[in-house]
Amino acid sequence: MVKLMRLMALDFRMILREQMLWFMFWVAPALQFAAVYLVLPILERYFPVLSEYRLLVLLLMTLQVVSSIGGVIAYMLLDEKDEEALTAIRTMPIGVNAFLFYRLFLGTSAAFVFAVLMLAVTNIAHLNLVQVLLGALLFAGTAPLVTLTLASFAQNKVEGLAVYKVVSLALLLPAASFFLGSAFKYLLGVVPVYWTFHFLAAVDAGKTGLLELGLALLTHTLAFWGLLRVFRRRVFG
């Protein structure tokens, strides 16, 4: 535990030291929150049509928050990959598994906190406490998926930025399902965020959302398991 606390202190120093990291970890989430909580109500006064899409705006903004946090953790791993520190971790007492779990847990926890704030404080979604926590948990599950994708398929932070853009676009695709009336929209369900969106849309409309919740947990679990295997093979294999 002491070793993990030391690692956490070092990680936060790294985040504060690099402008891009602290912007993505602290400033970007704060700006997203301010946009939804302060700016969106003002825009709705001048553009009433936005009121019909306020829930979707909230979902997309929350997605951007958690994905940016996942990106920060990935960039830290890519830095260590450049310096061959990840290889050296194999010989450390903490071990590879504990180190990887810690890093993913750090990003997931931060994403969960920000997601709770986005869903609960903005007063846009009609959710009870349990629904807020479940929705935040699903959103937080996106962070490690982003982290593992970037850390697996990018060799450095420059490549990481390119991969992050592709991942961000892929994560936005499920938003199109709100505008598609045919069964074609279910093809977007291969992206775990699709079920997160539709779970929150269902409970916001007064439904149970149990099917969407189950599918969200299933797709997130499968994606995490698959990406974790890819990461281990490409980075530690």
Image (cartoon, helix red, strand yellow):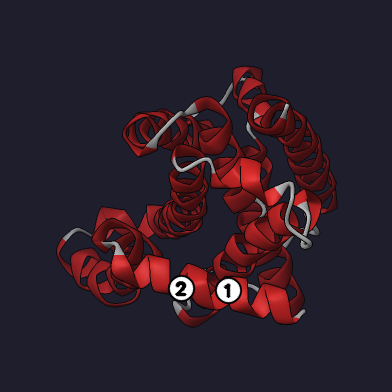
Rendered residue at 80%/47% (across/down): 217
Is 227 above or below relative to 206?
above
User: Circle 2 is placed at which residue position?
Assistant: 12
Q: Is residue 67 above or below residue 132?
A: above
Label 1's element? Answer: helix
Q: Residues within 10 Å of mark 2 (few under 14, many from 20)?
A: few
Amino acid, disc 1: Met
Given the current orientation, which residue lies at the most extreme left position?
46
Is residue 196 among what the camera can see? yes
* Coordinates of residue 227 in the picture (x, y in percent): 70, 32
How far apart, in angstroms, are the residues tagged by discs 2 and 1?
6 Å
Front-most of 148 and 79?
79
Where 105 falls versus 64 (above or below)? Answer: below
Asked where in the image residue 39 lies, by quadrant, the reply is: bottom left
Assign a secondary structure to mark 2. Answer: helix
Q: Is residue 120 left or right of residue 53?
A: right
Rendered location of residue 228, percent (x, y): 74, 36
Q: Mark 2 and 1 residues: CB-CB less than 8 Å, in contact?
A: yes
Name the residue that disc number 1 marks. Answer: 8
Q: Amino acid at mark 2?
A: Phe
Q: Which image quadrant is residue 146 in?
A: top right
Q: Along the line of sight, which residue is nearer the eye, 21 or 207?
A: 21
Q: Position of residue 233 (x, y in %)?
A: 73, 25
Q: Position of residue 237 (x, y in %)?
A: 73, 26
